[in-house]
Image (cartoon, rainbow, N blue to C red):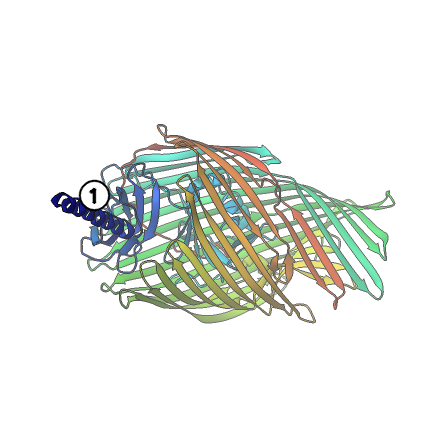
C-alpha cells in the first residue's frame, strides 16, 4: 500500500513538473529596456536576437518611445542579443528567456569596443520610425547592379527611364539625397546618375515618404536617401569590387572605398566607374483625323547608346574641441551618354504613304558636377546641438545633336536636310543652413533652423539648318535663357511623449521664393514671388508590444525643374518634338498617411491631393498640322489612394525573404488640352526577394517586381516587370565574396504608353525596349582594421536642392 502511494506521488510530481515545463515553454520571452548612462530611454535602438550556436538572425525589432523591446514565443535556448544605436557603443551579450524586463545600458561612443565579430544579417527591408530602409548589401542580386536597379524593386517606387522620372507611393516629385545631402540634380541627369552609381558602393537606401519640418518642402513624394559605404572603424580600412557583365550589352563596373580614423581625425573617400551599353528599340505611332483625312505617323528607332560614369568623393571630419567638430566634403561626377541612332519616319494619309524619311542622328549628353561642403557642429553642455552648413554646387551640361534627314518616294531619293542643335546648361547653387536641436527633458525635444538657397541657371540653345553648304541659325528656336531664383526658409518642430503609448510630433516650415526667367530676346518670361506655410503633424500610438499605429499629415510643394522651365527643342522627326515649358507653375499637395505595424508586418495607407501637378513628357497633338509636342505640363489636379503591405517571410532556417504589395487608385484631370481630360485607373505592384542558404559559404536569391498598368500624367503606362537571380560564394578568411547574377531573366523591362482622345481626334502609342537580359560576375573584398568606433553623424545644407536639376 505504502509502495502504491509513493508510486502515485511520484507520478503526480512528474505530471506537475511536466505541466510547469510546458507552461514555461509556452510563455518564454525576452523583454528589455535600453537606456543611456544618464538613465534616458534610447528610442529607435536596433535589437537583433541571434542564435547563440551560429549567430543566425532569429528576429529583429526597434525600441519604442520608452526604450522597450520584446521578443515573444521563444523556445528555451541560448541566444545572443545585439543592441545598436547611433552615438553609442554596440553591445553583444548572451541572454536567455525570462519573464521579467531587463534593463540594458549603452555607453557613449568615446571608448573603443573590444573587437567582436557579429554574423547577424539585417533583413533586406527594415521599417523604422520615420522611413523604410533597403539594406542593399544584403541582397545577392544587387551585386554588380546600379542604384536604379535597386529602386525599381523597392516597395512603392516607380522608375520611368525614358522620361527620366522617379515616383514614390504613386506621387511624382521625389527628392534624392546622398548621405543625407540633397542632390539638387536636374531631373534629366538624375536617372543617368543613379544608373551610373554602382550598388557595390551603397550601404543602404532610405525611403522617407513623410518628411518632418526640418527637410525642405520641395517634392511631393518625399525623399530617397542613398547612404554610401563609410566604415566606422578605427585605423585604415576599405573595400573594393570589380564587375564584369555581358550578353545583351555590356556593363563593367568598379568601385573603391577607403577610410582612415585616428583619435580626432577621420578621412574618407571613394571612386566609382561604370560603363553600360545596350541596344534600344523604340516605336512611336500616332493617328489623327481632321476634315475626313486620317493621318498616320509611324516612327521606328534603333539606338546604340553607351553611358560612361565616373564618380569621386573625399571628406574629412576633425574634432577641434571636446564638443566641436568641423568637416569638409568634396564630391563630383562626370557622366557621358553617347548615342548613334537610325530612325524611319513615315506619314500616311488615308492609307497612302506621302512622306518617308530616313533619319540618322548622333547625340552626346555630357554632365559634369562638383560640390564643396563645409560643416561645423557644436554640442552644448545641456545637450543642445548646433549645426552650420554651407555648400557650393555646380552643374555643367553639354548636349549636341546632329540630324541627317533623307526623304525618299518609293525608294527613290528626293532630298537631304541636315539639322544640328546644341544645349549648354550651367547651374550654380549656394545653399546655407543653420540647425538647432535640444532635448528639453525626457518627454520633450525641439528643433529649429534657417536656410537660404541662391540659384543661377543659364541655358544656351542653338538650332542650325544647313543651307547651300552653310550652317544658318534658326532664330525661332535659338536663344540664351537665364534664371535667377532665391529661396529663404525657417522652421520649428517639437517632439513630445505623452505617455508610454502615445507620442506626438508637429512642425511648421515657411518658404519664400523669388524666381525670374528671361532671355536676350525677352525679359521676364517668368517673374514670380510666392510664400507658403508647410505644416507637419505625427501621432504614434502603441497598442501593445506587438501592435502600433501612426498617423501623419504634411503639406508639400513641387517646384518645376530648371530644365523644364527653360525653353528648348529636341527633334524626333520634322513633326515630332520634345520641348520645355516656361509657363509651368509649382504644384501644392496635401498628404495624409496611416501606418499599422503587426509585429514584423507593416501596412500603410496614403492619400494625396495635389493641385497643378507637373506631368512630365505629356503629349500635345495638333490634329490639323499632325504635330506632336512632348513637354512637361501642369495638370489641374491629381489625387491618389495608395496602400503598401510589407511582409517578411521565413519558411525555414535556410529559406527567408521579403514580399511587398502595393495597390493604388489614381485620378488625374488635365486642362492643358481642351476639352479637359479626366482619367481614372487602379493599379498594383509586387516586389521582393527569396533567399536560400545552401551552406555557410553559398547562398542564392531570386528577386524582382511586377507593375500593373498605371497613370503617367494623363497617359496610361502598361504593365512591366523583371525577374533576377543571384548566387554568392563567401571566402571568410579573406573577408571577400564572389557573386554571379542574371538581371531581367525574361527580358520583360519594356515600357509601353498610350494616350487617346476621340473628341480631339487622335490616338498615340509609344513602345520602349530599353533593357534586356544581362549576366554579371562581381568580386568584392574588405580590408583593414576592424575595431569599432562610432563616426560623427552629419549632414549638409544641400539636402533638397540637387533635385531641381534635370
Q: Give the left or right position of residue 22, taking residue 567 as reference.
A: left
Front residue of 189 and 713:
713
| Residue furthest left in the image | 2
Query: Residue 155, how many percent across, how many down?
Result: 49, 53
Query: Residue 121, how many percent across, how many down?
Result: 37, 42
Query: What residue lies at 68% left-to-right and 57% top-to-bottom?
Result: 754
- Locate the N terminus and report the quarter of the image it occupies: top left
Visible residue check, residue 566: no
Query: What residue lies at 33% left-to-right and 67% top-to-bottom?
Result: 504
Q: Give the left or right position of residue 543, taking residue 711 as reference.
A: left
| Residue furthest front in the image | 1
Query: Residue 295, how many percent across, how many down?
Result: 81, 58
Q: Give the left or right position of residue 767, taking residue 589 as reference.
A: right
Visible residue check, residue 460: yes
Residue 592: image quadrant is bottom left
Q: Give the left or right position of residue 687, taking residue 758 as reference.
A: left
| 597, above or below 135, in the image | below
Front residue of 16 and 779:
16
Residue 612: image quadrant is bottom right
Front residue of 363 and 300:
300
The residue pinned by badge 1 equals: 111
SS type, badge 1? loop
Query: What residue lies at 58% left-to-right and 39% top-to-bottom?
Result: 745
Residue 520: image quadrant is bottom right
Front residue of 13 and 318:
13
Query: 10 Å neighbourhood of mark 1: few (<14), some, or many (≥20)?
Result: few
Query: Residue 514, how many percent across, how many down?
Result: 49, 67
Q: Tally the numbered discs.
A: 1
Amino acid at each position: 500500500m505504502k509502495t502504491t502511494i509513493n508510486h502515485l506521488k511520484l507520478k503526480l510530481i512528474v505530471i506537475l513538473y511536466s505541466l510547469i515545463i510546458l507552461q514555461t515553454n509556452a510563455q518564454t520571452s525576452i523583454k528589455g529596456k535600453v537606456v543611456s548612462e544618464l538613465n534616458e530611454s534610447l528610442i529607435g535602438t536596433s535589437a537583433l536576437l541571434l542564435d547563440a550556436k551560429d549567430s543566425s538572425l532569429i528576429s529583429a525589432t526597434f525600441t519604442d518611445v520608452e526604450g522597450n523591446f520584446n521578443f515573444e514565443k521563444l523556445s528555451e535556448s541560448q541566444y545572443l542579443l545585439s543592441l545598436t544605436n547611433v552615438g553609442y557603443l554596440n553591445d553583444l551579450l548572451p541572454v536567455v528567456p525570462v519573464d521579467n524586463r531587463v534593463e540594458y545600458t549603452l555607453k557613449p561612443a568615446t571608448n573603443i569596443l573590444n573587437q567582436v565579430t557579429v554574423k547577424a544579417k539585417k533583413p533586406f527591408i527594415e521599417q523604422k520610425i520615420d522611413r523604410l530602409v533597403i539594406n542593399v548589401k544584403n541582397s545577392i542580386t544587387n551585386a554588380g547592379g546600379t542604384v536604379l536597379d535597386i529602386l525599381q524593386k523597392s516597395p512603392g517606387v516607380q522608375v520611368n527611364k525614358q522620361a527620366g522620372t522617379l515616383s514614390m507611393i504613386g506621387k511624382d516629385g521625389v527628392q534624392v539625397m546622398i548621405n543625407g545631402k540633397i542632390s539638387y540634380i536636374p531631373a534629366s541627369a538624375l536617372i543617368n546618375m543613379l544608373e551610373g552609381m554602382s550598388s557595390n558602393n551603397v550601404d543602404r537606401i532610405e525611403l522617407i515618404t513623410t518628411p518632418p519640418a526640418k527637410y525642405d518642402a520641395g517634392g511631393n513624394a518625399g525623399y530617397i536617401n542613398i547612404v554610401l559605404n563609410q566604415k566606422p572603424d578605427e585605423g585604415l580600412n576599405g573595400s573594393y569590387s570589380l564587375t564584369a557583365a555581358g550578353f545583351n550589352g555590356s556593363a563593367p563596373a568598379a568601385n573603391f572605398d577607403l577610410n582612415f580614423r585616428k583619435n580626432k581625425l577621420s578621412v574618407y573617400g571613394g571612386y566609382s566607374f561604370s560603363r553600360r551599353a545596350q541596344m534600344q528599340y523604340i516605336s512611336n505611332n500616332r493617328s489623327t483625323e481632321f476634315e475626313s483625312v486620317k493621318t498616320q505617323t509611324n516612327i521606328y528607332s534603333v539606338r546604340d547608346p553607351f553611358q560612361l560614369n565616373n564618380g569621386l568623393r573625399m571628406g574629412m571630419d576633425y574634432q577641434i574641441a571636446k564638443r566641436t567638430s568641423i568637416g569638409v566634403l568634396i564630391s563630383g561626377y562626370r557622366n557621358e551618354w553617347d548615342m548613334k541612332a537610325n530612325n524611319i519616319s513615315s506619314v500616311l494619309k488615308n492609307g497612302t504613304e506621302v512622306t518617308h524619311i530616313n533619319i540618322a542622328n548622333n547625340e552626346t549628353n555630357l554632365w559634369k558636377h562638383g560640390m564643396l561642403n563645409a560643416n561645423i557642429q557644436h554640442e552644448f553642455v545641456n545637450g543642445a546641438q548646433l549645426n552650420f552648413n554651407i555648400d557650393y554646387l555646380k552643374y555643367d551640361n553639354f548636349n549636341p545633336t546632329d540630324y541627317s534627314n533623307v526623304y525618299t518616294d518609293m525608294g527613290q531619293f528626293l532630298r537631304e536636310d541636315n539639322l544640328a542643335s546644341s544645349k549648354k546648361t550651367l547651374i550654380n547653387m549656394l545653399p546655407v543652413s543653420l540647425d538647432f536641436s535640444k532635448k528639453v527633458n525626457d518627454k520633450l525635444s525641439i528643433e529649429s533652423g534657417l536656410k537660404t538657397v541662391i540659384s543661377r541657371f543659364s541655358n544656351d540653345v542653338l538650332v542650325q539648318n544647313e543651307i547651300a553648304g552653310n550652317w544658318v541659325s534658326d532664330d525661332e528656336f535659338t536663344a540664351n535663357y537665364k534664371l535667377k531664383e532665391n529661396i529663404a526658409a525657417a522652421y520649428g518642430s517639437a517632439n513630445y511623449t505623452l505617455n508610454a503609448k502615445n507620442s506626438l510630433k508637429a512642425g511648421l516650415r515657411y518658404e519664400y521664393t523669388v524666381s525670374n526667367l528671361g532671355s536676350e530676346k525677352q525679359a521676364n518670361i517668368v517673374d514670380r514671388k510666392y510664400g507658403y506655410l508647410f505644416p507637419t503633424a505625427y501621432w504614434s500610438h502603441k497598442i501593445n508590444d506587438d501592435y502600433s499605429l501612426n498617423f501623419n499629415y504634411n503639406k508639400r510643394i513641387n517646384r518645376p525643374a530648371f530644365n523644364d522651365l527653360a525653353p528648348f527643342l529636341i527633334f524626333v522627326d520634322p513633326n515630332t518634338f520634345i520641348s520645355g515649358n516656361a509657363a509651368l507653375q509649382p504644384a501644392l499637395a496635401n498628404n495624409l498617411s496611416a501606418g499599422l505595424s503587426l509585429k514584423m508586418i507593416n501596412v500603410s495607407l496614403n492619400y494625396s491631393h495635389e493641385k497643378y501637378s507637373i506631368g512630365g513628357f505629356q503629349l500635345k497633338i495638333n490634329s490639323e498640322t499632325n504635330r506632336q509636342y512632348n513637354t512637361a505640363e501642369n495638370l489641374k489636379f491629381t489625387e491618389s489612394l495608395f496602400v503598401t503591405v510589407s511582409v517578411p517571410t521565413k519558411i525555414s532556417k535556410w529559406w527567408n525573404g521579403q514580399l511587398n504589395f502595393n495597390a493604388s487608385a489614381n485620378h488625374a484631370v488635365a486642362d492643358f488640352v481642351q476639352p479637359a481630360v479626366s482619367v481614372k485607373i487602379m493599379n498594383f505592384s509586387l516586389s521582393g526577394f527569396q533567399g536560400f542558404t545552401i551552406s555557410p559559404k553559398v547562398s542564392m536569391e531570386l528577386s524582382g517586381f511586377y507593375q500593373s498598368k498605371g497613370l503617367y500624367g494623363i497617359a496610361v503606362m502598361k504593365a512591366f516587370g523583371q525577374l533576377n537571380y543571384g548566387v554568392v560564394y563567401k571566402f571568410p578568411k579573406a573577408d571577400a565574396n564572389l557573386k554571379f547574377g542574371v538581371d531581367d531573366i525574361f527580358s520583360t523591362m519594356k515600357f509601353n504608353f498610350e494616350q487617346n482622345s476621340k473628341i480631339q481626334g487622335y490616338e498615340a502609342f509609344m513602345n520602349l525596349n530599353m533593357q534586356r537580359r544581362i549576366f554579371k560576375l562581381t568580386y568584392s573584398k574588405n580590408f583593414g582594421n576592424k575595431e569599432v568606433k562610432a563616426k560623427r553623424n552629419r549632414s549638409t545644407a544641400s539636402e533638397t536642392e540637387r533635385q531641381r536639376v534635370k
